[in-house]
Amino acid sequence: MDKFMMFFLFILITLISFLTDFIMKKQLLFALFVCFGLSLQAQSFSAGLKAGRQYSNYTKIKDSKGTILYHAGVHGTYSLTDRFALQTEVLLSRQGQNAKDKSTKERAMYLNVPVLAKYQVLPRLNVLAGGQIGFLMRAKLLPGEKENGIDKVDLKHKYESTTLAGVVGVEYQLSDRWSFDARYNLGFGPFHKQLKDSRQNVFQVSAAYRLVSF
């Protein structure tokens, strides 16, 4: 078990190492320590892949609307009892908003690390609650659907490098390997240096596949 755990952790570190050109090393180490520290307390452990669609919205911005984008990554679940578990994830998350007149759209890529408590309320049905830290990788202003001649503009310097969110949701365990969840991520603080009152809110629907368990 210890050797298999170390092998999985090595693979996870290798995957995330490709992203170190985009985020600060201290932030990356924080995310890894959260994931690995929880594994030391686990009674059983499973890990796999997940991906899904999401509705992303920036609040309190005039003449803007939300848009449907995507997320994908890996997850690990640490079962502490028959009904209670801790779940951590490392997700690439595409977020943003569109101008209502379809002239422009903003797109940001985050490395999100949610840490969730999972409790089984009914057979195969779990409730989720916890927090999430997001590390900004890039942000751009892009042309919209209208042909207006606008070029891509780098907006990363206008965004905060990290964001925090609260997470609530439900999960349905379809089989031993497949599960589906729906969750809402509520932004806690400003994500934009000039739009201090705006928040990023995201509604996600995901499918997850368990690759290993022990």
Image (tube, rainbow, N blue to C red):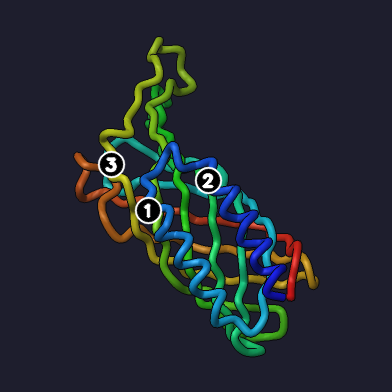
Q: Nearer the viewer, residue 46 or 1?
A: 1
Q: Where is residue 179 drawn, in percent x and y? A: 71, 66
Q: Quadrant of residue 13?
A: bottom right
Reply above or below: 103 against 33.
Answer: above
Label 1 and label 2: CA atoms lie apart by 12 Å
Q: Residues within 10 Å of mark 3 (few under 14, many from 20)?
A: some
Reply above or below: 167 against 1.
Answer: above
The mark nearer the N terminus, 3 or 1, is 1
Marking on residue 27:
1
Q: Quadrant of residue 61?
A: top left
Residue at (38, 34) in percent of width and height: 139
> Between tags 2 and 3, which lies in front?
2
Marking on residue 17:
2
Q: Given the image, on which type of amino acid does mark 2 rest?
A: Ser
Query: Residues at badges 1 and 2 in contact (C-beta under 8 Å)?
Result: no
Label 2 and label 3: CA atoms lie apart by 35 Å
Label 3 and label 1: CA atoms lie apart by 29 Å
